[in-house]
Image: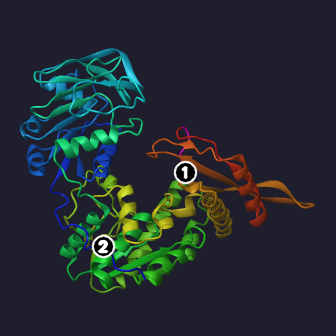
Amino acid sequence: MAEPLDLTSATQADIHAHRILILDFGGQYTQLIARRVREAGVYSEIHPWDMDETALREFNPAGVVLSGGPESVNLDNPPRVAPPVFELGVPVLGICYGMQAMAAQLGGNVAASEHREFGYAEIMPGDSELLAGLSDAESGAPFLKVWMSHGDRVESLPEGFVIAGESANSPLAAMEDRQRKYYGVQFHPEVTHTPQGQVIIERFVHDICGCPGDWTPGNIVADAIAAVRGNVGDGKVLLGLSGGVDSSVVAALLHQAIGDQLTCVFVDHGLLRHHEGDQVMATFAEHMNINVIRVNAADRFFAALAGVEDPEEKRKIIGGLFIEVFDEEAQKLAGIEWLAQGTIYPDVIESAGSKTGKAHVIKSHHNVGGLPETMRMKLVEPLRELFKDEVRKIGMKLGLPREMVFRHPFPGPGLGVRVLGEVKPDYVELLQLADHIFIEELRKNDLYDQTSQAFAVFLPVRSVGVMGDGRRYDYVVALRAVETIDFMTARWAHLPYEFLEHVSLRIINEVDGISRVTYDISGKPPATIEWE
């Protein structure tokens, strides 16, 4: 049984009291900005550049960051910084387009550059509060290695601003108005390609905005537990437990908050990884003493999938049946008032959802595919404010096994989309065994954490092979491993040949029914990460 989390050392201060507002101008790195601010221990939220004035003022930020974006300030009707931003009396940091918009609106001039800057560049810091003392030079004159991505540039500064940095292509690559605490950088400090970027972010939120570093895993957990207890009271909560990172952390967090008021329903559809169902039950039911109802529904899922080959149709069948089975179990439970979900902050951003803490009635939607309209429960989403990396940090804080917290993404329909064509029980069994060997060897060789996602795929084709003196005509599996930061693009993982050879030999020798192993060397794009 897991020991109760000691929260006595965690401050009970309002961890949302000092917060940074990030106004999104459509930049591809906007979520990275928010994550970097949070890594500095400061709460941040992303809102659209045209955020309602009343909401903007009510947010009451300690500072504002203006993101990059794809547009030009010289368009007929470009995205603009709302005038109230400059009336709040708080520090403002403009990044790339954010700097250009600030310059243009405050009286400077922005024009198209004859030489666009995309990729690596070097900045020579000037008389700067934001960049003072920072350098990537081993000796000689200081300079900063940065990442640029812009076609326009600031040609003249607004009144009150001074040059804070320059590059070969952008004489005004950074600017400051220290009296009003307005700062602009043409480069992207939020990306890893800018080595001093995190220091710049920390300097802005701590030294300039005056924010303490209260946004820590311990404080986040303490705050979430207090919020759950305040909202739920003595009500009963139902959670659909999948064994994935998000639902696992929600289960652990709710158990800490409300104990046996929580009931989890684990629908085992037979499409999980090798022995994964037993592992889920061992972790939560046996070791953490959480009330988990396991529904063994593999036969129902395989029957529903019989003869179905189209991947989208398989997804719909699996998602719909999951909800049906979950609903059947929910109807058996008396007095359930709340439904828990593992919604995280990127989901909220993408759906333009409302802020956390606003319980509402569930009618026809759910993050696993849509609940019946007859199921009416209030919603509790304790991870709604958190990015995936933050979810993992608090999962470790709550005592979950590291292998569970940091495991690779797994599709909602499970192995149903990793078996190409019709999903048959014997195909799934072969795939489970092959996938298990692949993952086991990745962990043994310290390669698992170096890949972002790795798995095996079952191909419904047969190939001739030879074992001993006998001819075999068995199935083929493909191994897939990728490296990525955002999962929008990815490159195939350059795993050692010797490692791949060893994995292949193990699969062919140990999995009766597999005669050939291939390795996928397709990037994304043009391929997708999953094979479906």
User: Which residue is depicted at the point 67% across and 65% down?
Assistant: 427
- As drawn, the label of residue 339 is 2
Looking at the picture, how far across and down is residue 344, in whole percent? 33, 58
User: Which one is earlier in the sequence, the residue at label 1 or at label 2?
Assistant: 2
Task: Please give the residue where the numbered disc 1 appears in the rendered image.
Answer: 450
Q: Which colour scheme is used?
A: rainbow
Left of 92 or right of it: where is 132? right
- From this viewpoint, is residue 82 visible? yes
Left of 244 or right of it: where is 300? right
- As drawn, the label of residue 232 is none
Looking at the picture, how far across and down is residue 504, in whole percent? 73, 55
Query: What's the residue type where badge 1 is placed?
Result: Gln
Looking at the picture, how far across and down is residue 312, in whole percent? 51, 54
Among the 4 quarters of the image, the one containing residue 169:
top left
Query: What's the residue type where badge 2 is placed?
Result: Leu
User: Residue 97 or 167: which is nearer the viewer?
Assistant: 167
User: Residue 188 or 109: which is nearer the viewer?
Assistant: 188
- Per the rendered image, the range of residues in magenta is 526-532
Looking at the picture, how far across and down is residue 29, in whole percent? 35, 39
User: Which residue is depicted at the point 28% across and 80% down?
Assistant: 258
User: Which residue is depicted at the point 35% across and 69% down?
Assistant: 250
Mark 1 or mark 2, whichever is nearer to me: 1
Mark 1 and 2 residues: CB-CB less than 8 Å, in contact? no
